[in-house]
Amino acid sequence: MVLTLPLSQLPHGLPPCAPDLQQEAEQLFLSSPAWLPLHGVEHSARKWQRKRDPWSLLADWGAPVPSDLQAQRHPTTGQILGYKEVLLENTNLSATTSLSLRRPPGPAPQSLWGNPTQYPFWPGGMDEPTMTDLSTREEAEEEIDFEKDLLTVPPGFKKGVDFAPKDHQAPVPGLLSLSRLLEPLDLSGGDEDEGEPAGGPGGGTAAASPCSAPLGRASSLEDLVLKEASTIASPLEPPKPAPQEQWAVPVNVTSPVGDFYRLIPEPAFQWAFEPDVFQKQAILHLEQHDSVFVAAHTSAGKTVVAEYAIALAQKHMTRTIYTSPIKALSNQKFRDFRNTFGDVGLLTGDVQLHPEASCLIMTTEILRSMLYSGSDVIRDLEWVIFDEVHYINDAERGVVWEEVLIMLPDHVSIILLSATVPNALEFADWIGRLKRRQIFVISTVARPVPLEHYLFTGNSPKTQGELFLLLDSRGAFHTKGYYAAVEARKERMSKHAQTFGAKQPTHQGGPAQDRGVYLSLLASLRARAQLPVVVFTFSRGRCDEQASGLTSLDLTTSSEKSEIHLFLQRCLARLRGSDRQLPQVLHMSELLRRGLGVHHSGILPILKEIVEMLFSRGLVKVLFATETFAMGVNMPARTVVFDSMRKHDGSTFRDLLPGEYVQMAGRAGRRGLDPTGTVILLCKGRVPEMADLHRMMMGKPSQLQSQFRLTYTMILNLLRVDALRVEDMMKRSFSEFPSRKDSKAHEEALAELTKRLGALEEPDVTGQLADLPEYYSWGEELTETRNMIQRRIMESVNGLKSLSTGRVVVVKNEEHHNALGVILQVSSTTSRVFTTLVLCDKPVVSESPQDKGPTTPDVPYPDDLVGFKLFLPEGPCEHTVAKLQPGDVAAISTKVLRVNGEKISEDFSKRQQPKFRKDPPLAAVTTAVQELLRIAQAHPSGPPTLDPVNDLQLKDVSVVEGGLRARKLEELIRGAQCVNSPRFPAQYLKLRERRQIQKEMERLSFLLSDQSLLLLPEYHQRVEVLRTLGYVDEAGTVKLAGRVACAMSSHELLLTELMFDNALSALRPEEIAALLSGLVCQSPGDPGDQLPSTLKQGVERVKAVAKRIGEVQVACGLNQTVEEFVGELNFGLVEVVYEWARGMPFSELAGLSGTPEGLVVRCIQRLAEMCRSLRGAARLVGEPVLGAKMETAATLLRRDIVFAASLYTQ
């Protein structure tokens, strides 16, 4: 029985229990929402009055303390002896203030790409100042003697201020004084101390000079002066060259590496095959963390070196960057390396996959951007692999390789992979000097699969066997095969003439003939099992024509057709329905099912990747491709065919270069499958010349050449960093390497010359010798002026006409010094050579050069300088016949002799033979010699010469002014007083030696200075452009517009000006994208008349801004004209991009423009990258509206087939 009691009967009521939370929440928050505080309006307009304090905006943290006080204690007692100020390291380092690797990492979102406002890391090879250097410099500054060590010549000035007291001038050490001249003559009354040097401790330097030795007795003052002149030091000798530093070390790849596995017992990576010798040599150096340059033929296995470096970085837990010249190659390498290593990332303009991976694959432009932006990826970097380094020869993009190589930090090792180049050692030497580390050059010319080169002249089934061997696998050139091909071609032409008449053309170039040639060739190759084949054609249109013409050709089996069909279905399934029905997609699918393929830049990217993958599987039997297919991954074929040996390089048609031919021919021969590779050159018309074929097939590949040029992005990126200078970048470029590689030797020579100059005596220029320096300068200037005038004479038409047979000239070269000669014959070639009869001394056979003794240096007097001081034989007059170059003729006289030049030349040649050496000369020779001697005796200071202005009618300003200056100098020289002094010869020789040393020092200083840089004038012009446009200030500090331009990848000035002119802000996103297409489109064309008025006005405004920039460039001295600068813009795809951004399907775009689909896709992809750059720049400048529009524009562009993901990344 349950007893229920009322609540009142319990002493304390019911026990406590928890309330129902759900009901309580419903009651409080749902049933009565007015209870919630947020619905109260009494606090909604509450305001707290803030006290204004504008000075708080100016408050800033103080600068970090750069130094600290360190106590100095007694080592035994510990007693404090004093305090010393020491510099602190790493004080407040940041990415915006320091280039050091010790600076803290930047924000995590910027760790990959960096930031345009960050500093780059310190480039390797440049001297980074350490704290020790700074403290040493500071101590040196503190120890300046303000009385003796102050400079008197300001930087950039040639002369300074002489602060020495001028009341009493002490005699210069080592110079002759009157007492020293009179002392040997036993004249009394001389002051013994007068000739001794004064000046305190410095006076002892006279003992070291050659003229300070005691002079012997002499019978006269003249003998003494002549004796002193003979004791002058010998002429200036060049200093001994310093030993050459070897930065490029060639590695012998012929000797086998027998102890490879003993040296590397646990390799970081192992292959299923045994590496070649050159691969083992490279791996050994990689294990020692050396930088290597591997130059080998295509398909030789250079990728093995890259694979080992990637594996080594994974083993060391560091990172590797693999750079390629083109985006397609980056995608292919990503696929290959991901299958091999797994931990691989890809960075391209529009794709970012696994950026945290240990191996990152990217284009060289992206690595350059990361280096300039101070990406933290560089910290962990151990290797940078440059594939296809010979791409540095590219005129447009080659500068990127040089910039990256210069900017790489010191801790990064370099691996360079290249095709065979003749100057690999020179290029490696440049990098070694640049980075101050040895580069090991591993070069091999051996091919894993040797090649055989043929000529094919057939064009029908009857002639499909006309295949003639021209170059065998051993490298021997077969002229027999060449002549056989010529005969076969000639025989067919004669039959053609008999059948159709002699007036019929011998070469019918067109699709019909191409079809016959290719059908017969492919039938022959198929019968000999030499498929697959790559046909290189140097035109996109001809590629399509040749593939489309082979409609009757079917090279695949039913099983292969099924495999191709399934692969196509799987790859095209990612496209939207209308994109699968594109004409190019349908046409390519039909070709692929028959085993044919086409590969060029006009093909859609996804179709190119399908063709590449099917070709690598062996399902594409015949591939018609352009030159770009030979760049990059290893996709060899059994046979390579050249449609022609001529290509258009953008300006003219020319033959293939040896390097281009070797690069493409290297695709022939599959390693492990084919004993030899076959290369065939089609002879559709006449057979090419044998010399041209020999040059193309066996010539040396093109050398690696610098394409370094200055860009505004480079200048601005370096100007914003105080520690880096654009001049340092120019000095380290490959173009400056020939002149800069001897810098160390120049520095040593300069130091040696400075030492020699300090040991020389100062010449006496007092009294009668006061104008001696001017006399020397006048003589040097007169000689240079005359040489300049003579060069202009010899370059002029009238000057060369005057040098006819019989003309008397003054000859000056190494063999003859101002000797008279008469011209006998003049060669009719482009480089004129003058056969001349010249007076000379009779050769003395008895004396050897050692018996002659030292020759006394010539001291020029006014008559020697003003005139020519003609050579006169001392003994019997002799003659010789010499071949003179135009530079050997010092003057052309007004005299003309009547001579028989041919007869005199034959007689002289005859008398040079031992049998006729003692025969007397002919009367014509004797007469000519006597006439020349008579003229020389009548005019010892030179015969009257032809006036360049009056006689030769040279009206050039430099010649006229030079003639006036020469006459003025002659007057000054004749009025010189120093030549009347008995001490003139000795003092002149001293001054000349001193001036020669100074001139050589000036030359070496110029070579070591920035002024010798080839691009320095252009640099100053470009900086002036930036200064005029407001990108940098007068001090060279980068302003806001300059920082915005740094964020642009191309057309930095034009984009920045458009942004700051608000030319883009008022437009819609699709209109902005359409206008910017003119900056990235590569196919020229007109925008068309169907554009909206807004776009037409926008195009005109962009052109107007470009014209304004071009005019500023011209005004600052740059060579590029305004028309050329504006002509870089192509607005042919404005309508296409506009409609694409508005959502038009790609299948409907084809009717708007005749541009190939592949080029349209490339333009839109590059345009999306530019929109992202502008988005970042807009955020940097504080333009959120423009930034949002650029983000929207990039989103509108990124859709459908244009941005379909690469098959290699799936």
Image (cartoon, grey):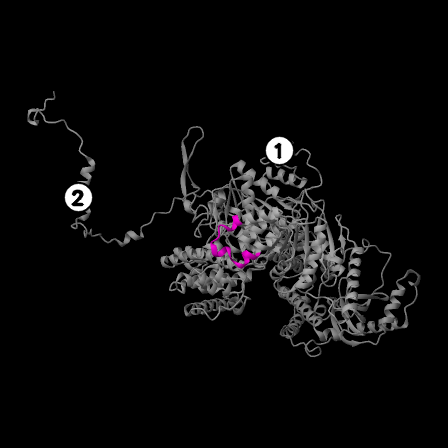
Q: Position of residue 1185 (x, y in %)?
A: 36, 59
Indicate the quadrant where residue 1075 lies.
bottom left
Amino acid carrying label 2: it is Ser
Say what secondary structure mark 2 lies in. helix
Tell me, for residue 44, which label it has, or none. none
Residue at image position (68%, 45%) is 444
Q: Is residue 583 magenta?
A: yes
Amino acid carrying label 1: it is Ile
Q: Position of residue 944 (x, y in %)?
A: 74, 76
Q: Is residue 906 left or right of residue 512?
A: right
* Principal secondary structure, stretch drawn in magenta: helix
Tell me, for residue 264, which label it has, or none. 1
Q: Which residues are magenta?
A: 569-587
Q: Is residue 713 magenta?
A: no
Indicate the quadrant where residue 234 lies.
bottom right
Q: Position of residue 857 (x, y in %)?
A: 73, 60
Residue at image position (49%, 41%) is 357
**2 or 1: tag closer to the N-terminus:** 2
Q: Is residue 244 left or right of residue 804?
A: left
Q: Is residue 1176 above or below residue 776?
A: above
Q: Is residue 611 left or right of residue 1112?
A: right
Q: CA distance from mark 2 to mark 1?
A: 80 Å
Q: Rate crowding at label 1 as few (under 14), some (14 to 19) or many (20 or more) other CA atoms within 10 Å.
A: few
Q: Is residue 318 above or below residue 365?
A: above
